[in-house]
Amino acid sequence: MDRPPAPAVALLLLVVIAAAVEGAGAEATGVFHVRRSLPAGGAGAAAEAYRAHDGSRRGRLLAAADIPLGGLGLPTDTGLYYTEIGIGTPTKRYYVQVDTGSDILWVNCISCDRCPRKSGLGLELTLYDPKDSSTGSKVSCDQGFCAATYGGLLPGCTTSLPCEYSVTYGDGSSTTGYFVSDLLQFDQVSGDGRTRPANSTVTFGCGSQQGGDLGSSNQALDGIIGFGQSNTSMLSQLSAAGKVKKIFAHCLDTINGGGIFAIGNVVQPKVKTTPLVPNMPHYNVNLESIDVGGTALKLPSHMFDTGEKKGTIIDSGTTLTYLPEIVYKEIMLAVFAKHKDITFHNVQEFLCFQYVGRVDDDFPKITFHFENDLPLNVYPHDYFFENGDNLYCVGFQNGGLQSKDGKGMVLLGDLVLSNKLVVYDLENQVIGWTEYNCSSSIKIKDEQTGATYTVDAHNISSGWRFHWQKHLAVLLVTMVYSYLIF
């Protein structure tokens, strides 16, 4: 942007992670009410669905490394979070998947002949038409946004040609189209539990063709909203326009089924942070050691190196946690050291066992230690999940069995991130967390006035109900694993 930014104002994204949803539609403008699609069929089906989902997420994270993956599958095979946003003048509503791993916002366009017209999620889909919006316009390939996106003027570019995009995921799913600019409607935090309507012009993709699972109606949405780090993301554009701080946070409540997702500077609770690894497309951090029951595991030092196909990623888009084989085996030996009489069963490829009693009383806490002395405490109820009467399954997975290219990576997913406030501070290139009651509230600073306002946990509704087991971890599909390949 070549004009000075206006004073930044905290933007609220009220994200509801509901255990069961029903009811009416979202408010007219801007608060990005996040909804969740969940697998039906009970705990067993949900557990297998989460595994299938994670296979997709892991592959998409590693798509740049040419790793094959499966699709998102049917509604009974996966879960996702999405939000309803307003675009254009007059405003129309669009359901978009929330994705912290990709950068651009895109929605299906009127010119798309293979875009799904209806969704297996029960949503009414809308095709965006730039001609229907008085504030909408196409972005030509000679405009600054296009040159910045592609690192210079595209070959053969003329003023009359659109700025095209093409996104391909590791499983072959794809979206192609062209960029447009229009007004995005959102709500700014204006007081304790209050917001006021606001808007800002953003550039986003107008999808003209979807391939693979993105062209299927099984779990179709209108598009994807990226919360990645690049300048093309909606967050970066709003920040450049002076609308928000380039900071966001989420708190996922697996106890009561609620949660918060907010953009802005969180001032309460205080969160200790660790640096993000520079020049990485995902939320990579430096893991230094792992304790089980207060005793440090003896692991090769190279297990904590960061680089291509190795390192540690914080990912709220993956339900389970994936560990290099040697780390996985050492943790499992330590966790079950006092339970050598346990008999394990393979249930839908999960390592499961029968147990009568409180797992939190009888199994050890695991602590991951990060740079700047930041611990991540993982309790038995975090790394085990119940999959039937007194049947517990392990939420840690042997990454060495998942894919050859991901076998050296530590991917920490929702089972270990839930019931914690996680803050992504992209302005200072740090990420942090603290154990927290995600059914309560946080305080965000209004950068314009200096005031601090309360943002409460919320639940939102939709027109249908998905039942799930509350002991299973919620899944925030912010798609840290959908790395875009242009």
Image (cartoon, helix red, strand yellow):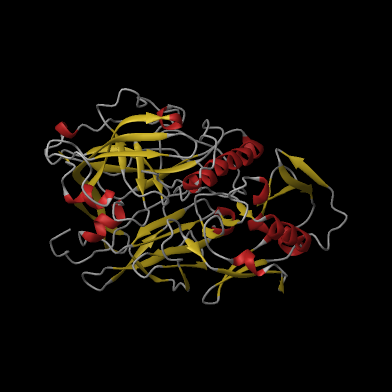
What percent of the width, then of the height, locates residue 206? 26, 36
- Residue 178 sits in quarter: top left
Q: Position of residue 480 (x, y in %)?
A: 46, 51
- The residue drawn where x is 38% and y is 25% is 118
Residue nearer the viewer, 445 or 369: 369
Confirm whether residue 18 shows in the render.
Answer: no
Tell how many labels.
0
User: Considering only vertical position in the picture, is 282 above or below 156?
Assistant: below
Q: Is residue 101 visible?
A: yes
Q: Which x, y percent locates residue 282?
A: 45, 56
User: Which residue occupies the foreground of this view, 2 or 184?
Assistant: 2
Residue 134 in the image, given as x and y percentages of width and height: 11, 38
Specify the quadrant of the image occupied by residue 88: top left
Residue occupying the point 33% across, 63% down: 264
Task: List the single residue furthest toward the top.
Answer: 113
Q: Is residue 85 left or right of residue 434?
A: left
> Where is 265 relative to 32, above or below?
below
User: Which is more toward the observer, 273 or 483?
Assistant: 483
Placement of the C terminus among the 4 image quadrants: top left
Residue occupying the far front of the picture? 155
The answer to which of 195 and 181 lies nearer the viewer is 181
Q: In the orientation shown, which residue stands out farthest toward the right?
A: 341
Furthest residue in direction bottom, as rendered: 373
Of the 4 image quadrants, the one containing the N terminus is bottom left
432 vs 136, left or right, is: right
